[in-house]
Image (spheres, coloured by chain):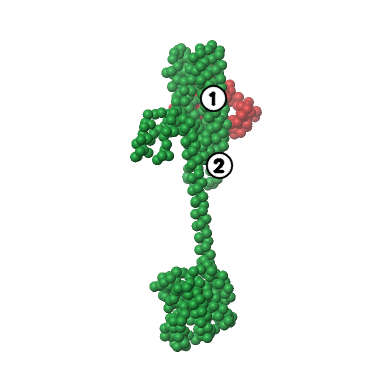
Chain colours: A green, B red
Amino acid sequence: MANHRVGETGLTESRPPNHHHHHNIPYAVLHGMNVPTSFIHQEGSAFGFGELEEAIVLQGVNIRNDEAKAPLFRPAATLEMFPSWPIRFQQTPRVGSSKSGGESTDSGSAVNTICSKTENQLEPESPISTKNTTPLDHQQEMASDFSRTGTSQNQPVAKLPQEKRRGSTSEKQLDAKTLRRLAQNREAARKSRLRKKAYVQQLESSRIKLTQLEQDLQRSRSQGFFLGGSAGAVGNISSGAAIFDMEYSRWLEDDQRHMSELRTGLNAHLSDSDLRIIVDTYISHYDEIFRLKVVAAKADVFHLITGMWTTPAERCFLWMGGFRPSELIKMLISQLDPLTEQQVMGIYSLQHSSQQAEEALTQGLEQLQQSLTDTIAGGPVIDGMQQMAVALGKLANLEGFVRQADNLRQQTLHQLSRILTVRQAARCFLMIGEYYGHLRALSSLWVSRPRESMMSDDHSCQTTTDLQMVQPSQIHFSDF
Amino acid sequence: MHCQTTGSWGSYMPTTRTAATVVVGDPLERIERLASENAVVIFSMSSCCMCHAVKRLFCGMGVNPSVIELDQDPRGRDMEKALIRLLGASPAVPVVFVGGKLVGAMDRVMASHINGTLVPLLKQAGALWL
């Protein structure tokens, strides 16, 4: 039979590349099975075997040219000559070899899939095959198909322009699907490339940030003291907070100066009036930090209230963004001897009233927290934005509490200076300054203390077990 | 601690705040009138947390202040504005009067407590006995 011959010809003479033709040829025919001729003629009204043989010859030519590039030769490859089954044809080159842009099926299932698709697609394609296509078109299509499939193994993308050359809608139908698929693949690949790029960039910037942080840490350690939190820190700190931190570090330097003045003034046994000047200067020095804190509370209340402006040890004792006045007085009471009875009463009264004020402010803050919780806690949220607006309004009250707490601190220090004599006041303020200085030094020591867990094998580094604050830089954690 | 924060206090003239008694007049006058009706008068708002703090302060001292919640008073808005003018600053509440005389907002109250002037004032007004 002619078909059989065709099939055999396909098998022996050529390696038909993947190829489309709009004409319907039953699968059985293509595989060289015995099929009654009548069956074939039924479908192939617009297709002539003459053309087919021409096509085969052309195909053969092309294939021989591309032989190096198209190693595929399969019995099922004869299917490729017939573009009527677009999907299947695309599958065939994949049978047992690398794909050429169509769906992937393994060789075992390909045949079956192709077979089923043949049956499925016979009907839809018959109208297509009856469309106005001249034999010339067919040939052109076949030729372009051959060349396409000839190179298909190596250039799946190159298929596209060749696919586009086709005029008939059956080709377009195939092309559309292929095109879409290829486009999607490209898009997906592009997106994943972009994601990868973004991720790498993020890693890079994090690395840079990390090295900067390490440098800052090294620097502050080598300076021997730990500036509470954020004087030179990288990262998320508001401008108000950063400004306050800078001002606070300057204030600390001034504090050192004032304290040495107090010390020398006490040791030099200055007159009371002279000492009074020094003491009043010191009180104004404290007034200044409270003024700065008012501004800071307005700019960034959370910075103050979380104690990020102080050292860790100070933070441990933090109350409403600063020291707790009654605790300070408790610390002073034992050291302020000798005191007159009146002074003792005054000091205890001061401690008592500051405790009451602290308690009142704490309860007010607790009510604020409760109110805030009630506002933002789940429940029936009618209007989320409104809820947030109300919560924001409540949160704004935090500033008031920090301000009142600072006010309390300021008033306490002033009252102390009123109760005490000049000399006692000078000693008192020196004690306060030294107390917080010790607390800050403790923080610094804590941060740079030797950590045994990090020294697994290298015991030589444990020589610095004695706490020497002066050389924290000896401990090089980078060695590990 | 039991602390009566609303309404009247036993031995003093009770504060009559009814919507029916519409006193036409200057809100400031009303404030002053209300302030003189009790030993310790706190102008407050029920939602204000700082007002709660000042109330707790007085209760903690054993004082039973008379509280006027402006948000619950029909003429509260006018009085609020008058208080801002009186204080020269916002917020209007809390404001404390002791013995009919203005002590001030929270910062003044705290300062006066710390510097030891508040307790004598309270004793003088009869709000505190020792």
Q: Choose top left, top right, bottom left or bottom right for residue B99.
A: top right
Task: Write down the chain letter for disc 2.
Answer: A
Q: Please name the residue shown 42% across and 18% down the image.
A: A334
Q: Please name the residue shown 49% across and 69% down the image.
A: A154
Number of marks in picture: 2
Residue toward you, A218 or A458: A458
Which numbered disc, 2 or 1, marks the residue that appears first in the sequence? 1
Q: Is residue A317 visible?
A: no
Q: Which residue is mark 1?
A: A254
Q: Is residue A383 visible?
A: yes
Label 2: few (<14), some or many (≥20) within 10 Å? Answer: few
Residue toward you, A413 or A392: A413
Q: Residue A88: percent from the left, percent from the top?
A: 47, 74
Question: Quadrant where the C terminus of chain A lies?
Answer: top left
Q: Residue A387: percent from the left, percent from the top?
A: 53, 43
Real-space Cα distance between discs 2 and 1?
42 Å
Tell me the SS state at disc 1: helix
Label 1: few (<14), some or many (≥20) within 10 Å? Answer: some
Amino acid on which the number 2 mark rests in the picture? Ala
Q: Residue A72: percent from the left, percent from the top?
A: 45, 74
Q: Which residue is mark 2?
A: A389
